[in-house]
Amino acid sequence: MRVARLAAMAVLAVVLLLSAFPALVTADPSDEQFRNDIDLPPSLRYPLGTDDLGRNRMARLLHGTRTSLLLAPAAAALSVVLACSIGLAAGGGGRIAVRLFESVADLTGSLPWLLMLIGLRAALPLEASPFATTAITFAMLALLGWAGPARVIRNLAANLRERDFTIQARALGQGGWRFSTKHLLPHVWPVAAAQFWINLPVFILVEANLGLLGMGIPEPYASLGNQLRDLESYQSVMNKPWLLAPAVLLTAVVSASWIISLTAEETA
Amino acid sequence: MKNLRATAVLVLLSLLSACAGTAQQSELRFILRSEPKTLNPLQVEDEFSELIRYLTGGFLVRINRATQVIVPELCETANLSRDARTLTLQLIKGARFSDGSPFDSADVVHTFQQLLSPDLHSATGDSFRVGGSGPVVKATGQHGVTIQFPQPVPGALRLLDQVPMLSSRSKEGIRAVLGPYMVTEQKQGASMLLRRNPNYWRKPGPSINTLRITYQSNRELEALAFRRGEIDLISQVSAPIWEDLQKALPQQAVDIGPSLDQEFLWFNQVTAGTKLAPQKKEWFRMTAFRKAVSLAINRPDLVRIAWRGRAVPSAGPMPPSNVMFFNKALKPHPYDVAQAKKLLAGAGFRLDGSTLRDARGTPVSFSILTNGGNRPREQMAALIQRDLKAIGIAVNIITLDFPALIERITKTFDYEACLFGFVLADPDPGYQSNVWPSSAANHQWNPRQPKPETLWEAEIDKLMLVQTTSGSQTERRNAFNRVQEILYEQEPFLYLVHPNALAAVSPAVQGVRPTILRPQLLWNIENLKVSRGK
């Protein structure tokens, strides 16, 4: 398992490196339209060919991966921070706090994510820049994604409260925020890390789904989601197998994340 | 005896298989992308219901989809009075509905009573209401009918192309039809079967026995079914799918030519009740600004890249294929960045590095709304974004789901520019009376004006009045030619392209004469034949 974890981390590291420095592979900007080079197959000039607007697919793949790999972890981290705060508060609270937590978590968990994101997109002000739109989309993912991890953390916190060392701490008069951060958080931390790795691929896939609906990251920005739209056409994929590159990369990133999350869970 | 039995069985089997083969041979199979919303022919609003109405309905007159000329069907004669207020119809004799009930003037009166009933809320019925009231329809004998309009309606005959006759006597109600086919089987959400009407009034009637229609919204799967020979034809094919079909089955892909559909961009010029920033409102209402943007858009690239060459650049609302109303004097606006910059400079804009600024120094930027999921439209938006960067304008593309887009452009007016398209069913601009008059709801750039806000819109109002009320076809054509000139000069809509109508037809189907008017492949269904090789 350790080997698998190392391999997964290596995959993520390579992907991160290339997407952070796409110039290592291609000097073309991701939004440059080479209008006389429409829909070309792979070549030395364009290693993954060009898309139907004449943009270098390799440049777009690397820039798109950067967008997805920067924002998805940020959103996953935010959702886990929220989950920890809410879960620990509920785990240390009374019956009413638990009831309230369960109701809100149930409600959040039952919300139709995709429809809410589409609705949010429609409600955004027109002046919102593509970057702001992208950031808000991922922030919304984070706000909607806390419920699952919070349940796990609340149950763990409630369990920990019955353990001898926490009973002793409370008997000595410790409570509130200090008790949670000093005595509960160190035990909750590995679980929170595992939840981060679980949320990460989920968020990348939700963005990809939005991209498939044409409502993901706006033009001219690239993301894994809007790259995957080319796979809608069965015939195109059959004729141009290099269109699968974003799917292969996404699978590699998601698989690597899962392997890391599994090993993180085991460690926890 | 044994031999005799075996021979009899063989003969029977071969007869049965011959019958089955014949039945299959005279069946036409195709896909609709959605189930028809209604089978009530008077309540049709979607194109799929419209197709079923076309195939099953009997009409007093029809627009010939190939020549775009009106031809009598269930009428021997149909005359519109000189003042364009009275239609006098002489019906054919001996026609019967599919259930055998006779057709005469009582059925015409009954149909119009139903159509104009306020309870029905029929969109077709609304098009007969001129100045708020509908026509008076009277029988003048068993086969004579007059239709009296309160105001002149020069396009009255064309309106009849939308009204299938209903029986006033049949117990089957709307299921009794006068058209070449009748609906005999319906599987909700899955399929429909249309069978030849045994009492069809025109002899010998269609040669195809049955039309098997299945519903499938996925265009890729529809194309796959066509490639496998499971269906016989596809219309309204998207350019990428058509390109693939052309490569695989070059003889079967059909490019009908520029359709009546329009793709265009417009700026929000609504003056009240909008959140639009004042300086943007000012830019958008400047003719020079709109013209500069138009000149900076590379229309040939839109055609070549977004439509794969299967479209033509637009000069106005009508494509060259509109025989009656295309203004031949107008040519598509050229791609001329230098001229665009010159126009902007003349209007007080200046280039500051790569950013265009207005007279107050505000950087020029705007957002373009379009509907998500429409690939060519999204690609056009990305191309326009890049084109306008060349004159220093920053464009933000916003794709929304369809209802959210409609909400913004028709109710809240919370948008800056919109890239959209119209699908026209009729080449006569008289049917766009909900678009051109300044008071119209679909006068998109500035709808529902209490009185025209600009001189050129006032002129369009006057011209459209002539266009919709004059009894002279030449006068109507001239009036709309001038409307097209004004639109060309003022560019409230920046017309971009007219996409081609693309289709595919199996060699098993003979007699297809594709047209740009819908139903593009099935309009002459009575002349189609299916012969499948063994």
Image (tube, grey):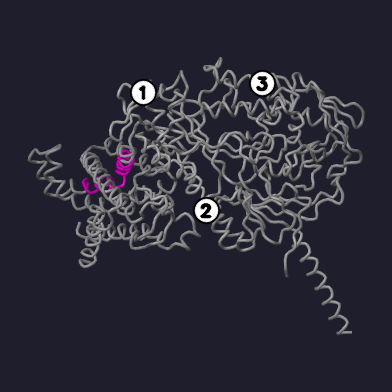
Q: Main secondary structure of the magenta part?
A: helix
Tell me if B16 is positioned left or right of B515 in this view.
right
Q: Alpha carbon of mark 1 to alpha carbon of mark 2: how far?
A: 43 Å
The residue labelled by disc 2 is: B240
Which is nearer the N-term, disc 3 or disc 2?
Answer: 2
Q: Residue B252's spot in the image, x, y percent?
A: 64, 59
Q: Give the number of the mark in front: 3 or 1.
A: 1
What SS does tag 3 mark? Answer: helix
Image: magenta residue range: A135-158
Does residue B405 belong to the magenta stretch? Answer: no
Residue at image coords 32%, 53%: A59
Disc sitting over residue B385 in the figure? none
Contact check, label 1 and label 2, Cβ < 8 Å: no
Tell me if B342 is positioned left or right of B250 in this view.
left
The residue labelled by disc 3 is: B465
B179 and B484: which one is in front?
B484
Tell me if B137 is positioned left or right of A154 in this view.
right
What SS does tag 2 mark? Answer: helix
* Badges 3 and 2, same chain: yes
Does residue A136 belong to the magenta stretch? Answer: yes
Residue at image coords 27%, 53%: A27
Is residue B96 visible in the rendered structure shown here?
yes
Q: Give the number of the mark in front: 1 or 2.
A: 1
Residue A82 position by quadrant: top left
* Badges 1 and 2, same chain: yes
Residue at image coords 56%, 15%: B451
Q: Residue B279's spot in the image, x, y percent?
A: 37, 22
Is the residue marked by circle 2 packed among few (<14), some (14-19), or many (20+) residues within 10 Å?
some
Q: In this rendering, is residue A61 above or below B315?
A: below
Disc sitting over residue B348 in the figure? 1
Tell me if B47 is positioned left or right of B1 in this view.
left
